[in-house]
Each structure stands twice: as C-alpha cells, then as structure tokens.
Image (spheres, rainbow, N blue to C red):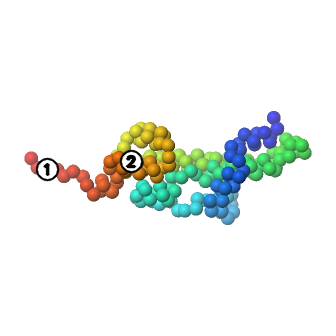
Amino acid sequence: MPFNCFLDSFITQPEEVVTKELSKLKPLNYNKFMWWRTHAQPGVPLGKRSPLKDRIINGDFDFSCYYWQAQSAAIQARKKVDLDKDNHQSQYEKTTVDVARYRRLLVDFEKEESARIEALIDAFTVSFKIDREELLDRLCNWPSDLLSFYESLEEFGTLTSVEIRKRGRPKKTKL
C-alpha cells in the first residue's frame, strides 16, 4: 500500500471546511517548544468561578482547535506527495514533519477534549444539582447547541447556581 493512501485515511474533512475553521482561529508565531501548533483559540477561557452561561457564551466548552490543525497537517502532507514520481522512501522523507505534527496535535486534541468535557460535566452538576448520568443522558439526546440546553434546564425549574447562593443553606431550627 502506498504511503499516500495511508495519509488519505487521516483526512476526514474537505480542505475548504478545514480552511474555513482555521480562519476563525488566531495564528501563532513559531515556538520551538510547541512547534506543531499553528493556531490558538481566539479568546481567553473564563475561570471556574465564572457563571456557567458566561463560560458557554465565551466558548470555553467549544470543540478543540487542535482537530482542525491536525486535519490541516494531514492535508499538507498529502499535497507534498506525488505517487507517480515518489517512491516509498521519498514519500516518507517529505511527510515526516507533517505526520509528526498530525500525531502531536491529535494527542493535544484528546487531552483538551477530555478536560473540556469533564469541566462541562462538573459545571452542570454543580450549577443544576443534577446527577452525572442524568446529565449525560439528557445532553447526548439534546438536538441543539449547548446554550439552548443550558436555557432549557434553567426554564424547567432546575436550580441555578445564583438561586442556590440566594437561598443559602437551610437554617437549623431549635427543638
């Protein structure tokens, strides 16, 4: 199997879609310690203590940018190879850096997505006093975006963090 076919299996999105998604991100200058990263998220994430709705609007739980960078690296590697002229060794030599970039970006993507999902679950369970399994069940079956999911939980009477703070803990009564 030619090396080029191997690269084709990594490319899951059309080049136009990848380019469009990368244009939404902030380009990075070269960094010798993080050479594989080419873009960053456009905004700064809010802190854990910020209201959940503000964090959702800010994009703290959006899809990681590392996926789009990895797709771009695979597309760039694919463009460097010519099956008619290049043998396996020259294909490998031409695409070594791009394949290494692709692999490192996928590792970053998996780490960041896991952290974002855990932060999202923690934020919802704390804000709405909802069980983790129930939250995952509702969230996985939700047909729309995360903000509308948040608003639907607010609307249907689940307590928000603001209401919990206003009400406070129940006072102990003397017998």
What amino acid type is highlighted by mark number 1?
A: Thr
Between 120 and 163, the one nearer to me in the picture: 163
- Percent of width and height locating residue 115: 51, 49
Q: Which mark is residue 153?
A: 2
Crowding at mark 1 (Cα within 10 Å: few <14, some 14-19, many 20+):
few
Q: Give me the residue at 43% from left, 56% from top.
A: 53
Distance from label 1 to label 2 (Cα)? 32 Å
Q: Give me the residue at 86% from left, 46% from top.
A: 82
- Whether residue 111 sits left or right of residue 90 in the image: it is left
The residue that mark 1 highlights is 173
Taking the image as drawn, is residue 107 in sight? yes
* Local secondary structure at mark 1: loop
- Percent of width and height locating residue 137: 44, 38
In contact (CB < 8 Å): disc 1 and disc 2: no
Position of residue 12 relative to residue 44, above or below, is above
Q: Give me the residue at 62% from left, 62% from top.
A: 26
Q: Residue 28 is drawn in which quadrant?
A: bottom right
- Whether residue 56 sits left or right of residue 66 in the image: it is left
What amino acid type is highlighted by mark number 2?
A: Leu
Taking the image as drawn, is residue 128 in sight? no
Task: Count how many numbered circles sit on residues in the image.
Answer: 2
Specify which label sits upstream in the sequence, 1 or 2. Answer: 2
- Whether residue 46 sits left or right of residue 83 in the image: it is left
Q: Give me the residue at 47% from left, 39% from top.
A: 141
- Percent of width and height locating residue 157: 32, 48
- Percent of width and height locating residue 87: 88, 42
